[in-house]
Structures are given as C-alpha cells and as structure tokens.
Image: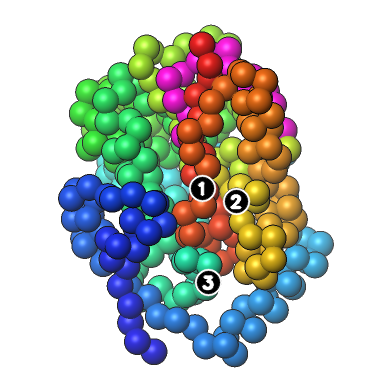
Amino acid sequence: MTVQTIQPADLEAILGEPVSERLKQRLAEFDLRFTEITPQERDQYILEAVRALVNPEIKVAGEHRIGDWERGWGENFDIFCKTGNPDAAVPLYFGKHPIVRWRRRWVRPVSESFDYRIICLLVEYAMERYMKDAAGIYEFGCGPGYHLLRARKINPTARLVGLDWTTASQKILNGMAASGIDPNLEGRNFDFYHPDETLEFLPNSVAYSVAALEQVGPRHEEFIQFMLRKKPELVVHFEPIDEVLEKDDLHDQLSVLYSNKRNYLRGYLPRLEELEREGRLTIHRKQRVHSGSFFIEGHSLIVWSPNR
C-alpha cells in the first residue's frame, strides 16, 4: 500500500480556511502518515463495529463512571509524581485501535500517536483562531490538562483553568502550577450535571471542551444554562455531533449508532439551534472535521456565544 502524508491542503480542506504557518510547521513535525485499507479489511472492520453495537457488555457514559475516570487520571497523576514530566498529562487511551477515521473513511496510521496528534492539531487551530488574545482560557472536562499546556504556547499570558469532575485532575494541574511548569494554571472541580455557581469567568474569556461533554449524553441542559448565565465571550467544542454527519453514509451512521450505544452526547446542537431562534445565543460555527477513532467521529467543531 502507498504511504500517504497529511498535507496543509488537507487541513485547509476540512477546516474550510487557510491555516497558519505555525500550524503548517506543527503538521510537518507530526509527520502524519497512513495507508488505505483494502475492501476486504473494510468489511472485517464493519463486522467488528457491528459486533460492538450488539455487545450488551459495552460500558455506557454517564455520572456512574466517575470512578473509572478517577482511576484513569490517577494513573497519569502517578506518572507525573514519579517523573515531574508534563508529558504525563497525555491520556493513556489513545492508539487503542489499528485504524482511525480520516475524511469519511478508515485508514491505517503509519506514524506513531496518529489519532492523538490529529486532535492536537485541531485543538491548536481552534486556540489560534479563537483564544490567542483571551484573558482566560477555561477547559471543561480537561482531564490531566494536556490541551491546556498547548494553550500556553499560543497564549503566553492567559489565566488557564482546567475543570474536571475527578480529583486526580486537580492534583495534576495544581501540581504543575506548584512545580513551576505553569504558575498561571489552576485546576478546579466541576460537574457537568451540577455546575459550580461560584465559578466566574474573567472578562474576555473563552470556554472550551474536547471529547468531554460527550459523557453527559442527553443531559446537557444544566451546562448550557450555566454558560448562558455566566456568559464567557465564546464557547468552543470538539465533540461528537450526530447532526453534522451524513444520514445516508454507512461509515457515518456506524459512528452515530456507536455514539448512541455508549450514551454519548446527543441533542446538543439542536438545543443550541433552538436557543438561537429564541435569541439567547449565537452559533458562529458548526462543522465536522473528518477525523476520529475507529468507532466514532467524535470531534465536530461547534462555536457559540451567549447573547448579552
């Protein structure tokens, strides 16, 4: 199979606009190479996806899984304690499957950490586009904070706040602040189901989430209303959004079915659109970015702001 490399033109095609020279350089550093899979392999992977859809033992997302996330981020915290290395912030769940989603098909990565690096590029794009001049950057569902560390390279002065429902997350972020990795970084506890009303955004702040709001399934109303009350300047999401996928595409619908099977985020974009019609918020962007894991295209881009 011919090895292909993701080029700046590929990024620009999925984002719909030019990318910066900095992002082009990052893409070159990541050297994202892949090969196509054969039709026979595609059939086998479709069968694997279908088997997962009918597997009654697949875990579903929700409030009951906080213990699993506590243990997962606890592993990252243990690594950080032993090494003091901020690379401990990288989650351990990337690279589970030999194929990933790219531009409406499955491909086989050749480069190491392909899926991790793709989402890093997309998040850095959004940070350049929407957060480089923000006074405060707040990540909801931040886990061990690996995206916040990248935000610092793009915005050297912003207050960085990572919010997560696990205590291990706060230990990692506050440990990084205390050790001097980033003194202007803070970890706070936050539960999507029961938002912390004591949290106040700095003026000119941006809130964002990356594959985190997915865990609430259909229970996103409390978070939306919280944002409408607290009024950050902008809200940016990379989350699974079924409505931007194609209804007559098998590959897309396998993603939708798996997302529903796992009780991932659903109904979020339609609710935002309803509130926009009521004049309560403005949606600036809603698009797919054509990347994801084996099972799901989970990083569609949504940008909105509360009306003032």
Residue 216 bears which disc, if any? none
Front-most of residues 62 and 45? 45
Q: In the rendered view, does 20 fall on the left or right side of 146?
A: left
Q: Upstream in the sequence, badge 3 or badge 1?
A: 3
Q: Which image quadrant for residue 41?
A: bottom right
In the figure, is residue 290 to the left or right of 117?
A: right
Q: Which callout, 2 or 3, points to the residue nearer the camera?
A: 2
Is residue 233 rendered magenta in the image? yes
| Label at residue 244 | 2
Tell me the quarter of the picture where residue 59 sits: bottom right
In the image, taking residue 98 as reference, residue 156 lies left or right, namely left
Asked if marks 3 and 1 touch (Cβ < 8 Å), the reply is: no
- Residue 65, given in percent of the width and then of the height, sits at 67, 42
Q: Position of residue 145 (x, y in %)?
A: 40, 37
Does the stretch in magenta take in 126? no
Q: Amino acid at mark 1?
A: Gln
Vertical comparison of 257 with 151: above or below: below
CB under 8 Å between callouts 1 and 2?
yes
Q: Nearer the viewer, mark 3 or mark 1?
A: 1
Magenta highlight range? 219-236
Residue in the picture at 67% in, 70% down? 250
Instruction: Say which residue label 3 marks.
Output: 105
Whether residue 92 can be seen here? no
Q: Residue 96, how many percent across, how many down?
A: 51, 65
Pointer 1 residue: 287
Mark 1 surroundings within 10 Å by alpha-carbon count, few (fewer than 14), some (14 through 19), many (20 or more): some
Q: CA distance from mark 1 to mark 2?
A: 6 Å
Graded by Cα atoms within 10 Å as few (under 14), some (14 to 19) or many (20 or more), the crowding at tag 2 reads some
Determine whether the residue tagged by mark 2 lies in a helix, strand or loop.
Answer: helix
